[in-house]
Image (cartoon, rainbow, N blue to C red):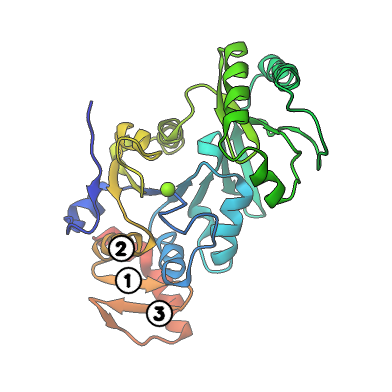
């Protein structure tokens, strides 16, 4: 099956898109925000507004702490938390707002027996390759549940020392190759400047999409997936392959336009910004005060039901 993502800036049929979309799922880095950076003001208010219009999921390879610093912390007070769904570490974990905090609904961890073998292999192979010498900063092996990470100089080594340790990636590639031979049940990858990452096999963004369709009991085509790497070599491509309605964006600026287009179509012409507390109707500022803004947000379910 060869699927392709649509280009968001190529004037899609927003009415059809709005009609056929039950929820949005976004990639994070390069889509909602620059790599590891918090979401910027221009997109943050519109993104927060979208959480009042339909359910929104974030599907990222990053850890939960990054989803918080890049997204949740930026719009925490102004979004509809009940409609935000967090899927860090490529959907191996799922968090939703339970009224008091972010509840972990499920986590897919490496089975204990496999995790033991992974730690044993990392220690043995790293010793054989002479990678356990010298000073370390913190633990070398961290079991994050869904991922085991080996950091040759420890978790907390200074960045400049880490970068100088294996500039051509030959040490970590050699370790990853040796460990991969020991662990046929797991995926072993050479990671950041000093690290090797081990995870369950078959975990990519199609896994996350599959979990979303189960959680929401919807067909994948009802999910509008938005990512910057939807090409065949990109990490968003598995989400395209999973059967979502996928949109390619070049960055947050495209993502904002796409969200506005769908929001307009779902609300009969309204676009609003939950940070600025402003409302536009058909491109015109409708000059509402704070009370009117709250009244507008309360009227949304009715407005959406009509369109
Ligand atoms: Mg990306």
Q: Position of residue 186 (x, y in %)?
A: 57, 19
Residue labelled 3 has its Cβ within 8 Å of some atom of ligand 1: no
The residue beneath circle 3 is: 278
The reply to whether residue 146 is visible in this rendering is: no
Distance between the Cα atoms at labels 2 and 3? 14 Å
130 on left or right of 193? right
User: How many tags in the picture?
Assistant: 3
- Rendered view: 141 above or below 184: below
> In the figure, residue 72 lies in which quadrant?
bottom right
Mark 1 falls on what kind of element? strand
The residue beneath circle 2 is: 263
- Rendered view: 42 above or below 106: below
Quick one: 251 or 176, which is closer to the camera?
Answer: 176
Neighbours of disc 1 within 10 Å: few (<14), some (14-19), many (20+): many
Q: Residue at x 47, y 23 (%)?
A: 202
Contact between labelled residues 2 and 1, with CB atoms less than 8 Å apart: yes
Quick one: 54 or 196, which is closer to the camera?
Answer: 196
> In the figure, residue 112 lies in which quadrant?
top right
Indicate which disc, 2 or 3, sits on the residue closer to the N terminus. 2
Contact between labelled residues 3 and 2, with CB atoms less than 8 Å apart: no
Q: Residue at x 40, y 54 (%)?
A: 31
Mark 2 falls on what kind of element? helix
Q: Which mark is residue 271?
A: 1
The N terminus appears in which quarter of the rendering? top left
Indicate which disc, 1 or 3, sits on the residue closer to the N terminus. 1
Q: Position of residue 244 (x, y in %)?
A: 31, 39
Q: Residue at x 30, y 40 (%)?
A: 231
- Rendered view: 121 above or below 13: above
Contact between labelled residues 3 and 1, with CB atoms less than 8 Å apart: no
Quick one: 87 or 271, which is closer to the camera?
Answer: 87
């Amino acid at each position: 099956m060869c699927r392709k993502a649509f280009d968001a800036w190529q004037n899609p049929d927003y009415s059809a898109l709005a009609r056929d979309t039950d929820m949005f799922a976004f990639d994070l880095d390069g889509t909602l925000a620059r790599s590891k950076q918090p979401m910027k003001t221009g997109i943050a208010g519109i993104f927060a507004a979208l959480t009042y219009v339909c359910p929104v999921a974030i599907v990222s390879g990053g850890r939960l702490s990054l989803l918080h610093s890049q997204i949740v912390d930026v719009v925490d007070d102004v979004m509809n938390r009940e409609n935000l769904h967090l899927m860090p570490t490529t959907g191996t974990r799922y968090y939703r707002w339970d009224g008091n905090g972010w509840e972990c609904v499920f986590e897919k961890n490496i089975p204990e027996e496999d995790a033991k073998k992974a730690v044993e292999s990392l220690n043995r192979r790293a010793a054989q390759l002479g990678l356990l010498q010298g000073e370390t900063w913190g633990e070398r092996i961290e079991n994050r549940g869904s991922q085991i990470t080996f950091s040759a100089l420890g978790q907390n080594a200074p960045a400049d020392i880490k970068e100088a340790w294996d500039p051509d990636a030959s040490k970590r590639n050699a370790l990853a190759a040796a460990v991969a031979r020991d662990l046929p049940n797991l995926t072993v990858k050479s990671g950041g400047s000093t690290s090797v990452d081990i995870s369950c096999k078959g975990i990519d963004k199609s896994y996350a999409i599959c979990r979303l369709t189960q959680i929401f009991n919807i067909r994948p085509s009802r999910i509008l997936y938005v990512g910057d790497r939807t090409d065949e070599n990109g990490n968003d491509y598995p989400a395209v392959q999973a059967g979502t309605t996928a949109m390619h964006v070049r960055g947050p600026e495209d993502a904002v336009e796409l969200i506005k287009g769908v929001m307009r179509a779902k609300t009969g012409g309204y676009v609003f910004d939950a940070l600025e507390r402003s409302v536009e109707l058909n491109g015109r500022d409708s000059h509402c005060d704070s009370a009117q803004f709250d009244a507008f947000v309360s009227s949304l379910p009715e407005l959406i039901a009509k369109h």
